[in-house]
Amino acid sequence: GVQVYQDGAELMLDRANDGPGTNTLTARLVLDCMGHSSPIVRQLRWGTKPDGVCAVVGTLASGIQNNSTGDVIATMSDLATDRSLQYFWEAFPAGSGPTDRTTYMFAYMDAEPYRPSLH
């Protein structure tokens, strides 16, 4: 696991091909991009399930001629109180080309088992 201290963090790594033992990796900043399945998240949550989830779907479109706007976030619906979720759309220029645009739809919701699907 990762040990976090006031002035940094420390990660013990298996030496693998270098023989038995471990190497220590230290850093002032740790970025964990693995999401809820991350060993760091499991360590911090002590086995408890997440309180909520963020469902995301996305796409990349090419050929967008007017692609000069930055981050655009919009919703076309009110908060659905019977489902406790609201759909958001986000769009921004992609780094893969000047006419490429990334679009995501996402919704935050709690993780209760009685919660209906995202239909």
Image: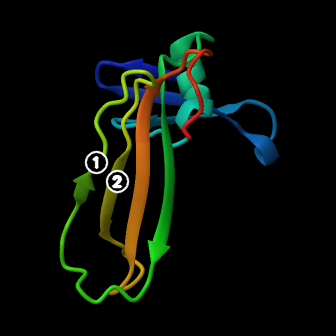
Q: Is residue 97 above or below residue 93?
A: below
Q: From the viewer's perspective, tell me whether residue 7 is left or right of residue 117.
A: left
- Residue 118: where, in percent of width, then height? 54, 37
Disc count in the image?
2
Which amino acid type is shown beneath numbered disc 2? Trp
- Residues at marks 1 and 2 touching, judged by CB atoms closer than 8 Å: yes
Give the residue at x 40% y 64%. 103
Residue at the extreme left: 69
Q: From the viewer's perspective, tell me whether residue 115 is left or right of residue 80.
A: right
Q: Is residue 32 above or below residue 74?
A: above
- Give residue 12's mark: none
- Secondary structure at badge 2 equals strand
Give the residue at x 40% y 68%. 102
Instruction: Kindly tell me whether residue 19 is visible in this rendering.
Output: yes
Give the residue at x 49% y 66%. 59
- Give residue 89's mark: 2
- Secondary structure at badge 1 equals loop
Local packing at callout 1 (Cα closer than 10 Å; few below 14, some 14-19, many 20+) is: few
Q: Nearer the viewer, residue 16 or 51?
A: 51
Give the residue at x 56% y 41%. 119
Local packing at callout 2 (Cα closer than 10 Å; few below 14, some 14-19, many 20+) is: some
- Residue 45: where, in percent of width, then height? 53, 14
Instruction: Kindly tell me whether residue 1 is visible in this rendering.
Output: no
- Give residue 75's mark: 1
Which amino acid type is shown beneath numbered disc 1? Thr
- Residue 100: where, in percent of width, then height? 39, 81
Q: Nearer the viewer, residue 67 or 115?
A: 115
Q: From the viewer's perspective, tell me whether residue 21 is left or right of residue 76.
A: right
Picture quadrant of residue 65:
bottom left
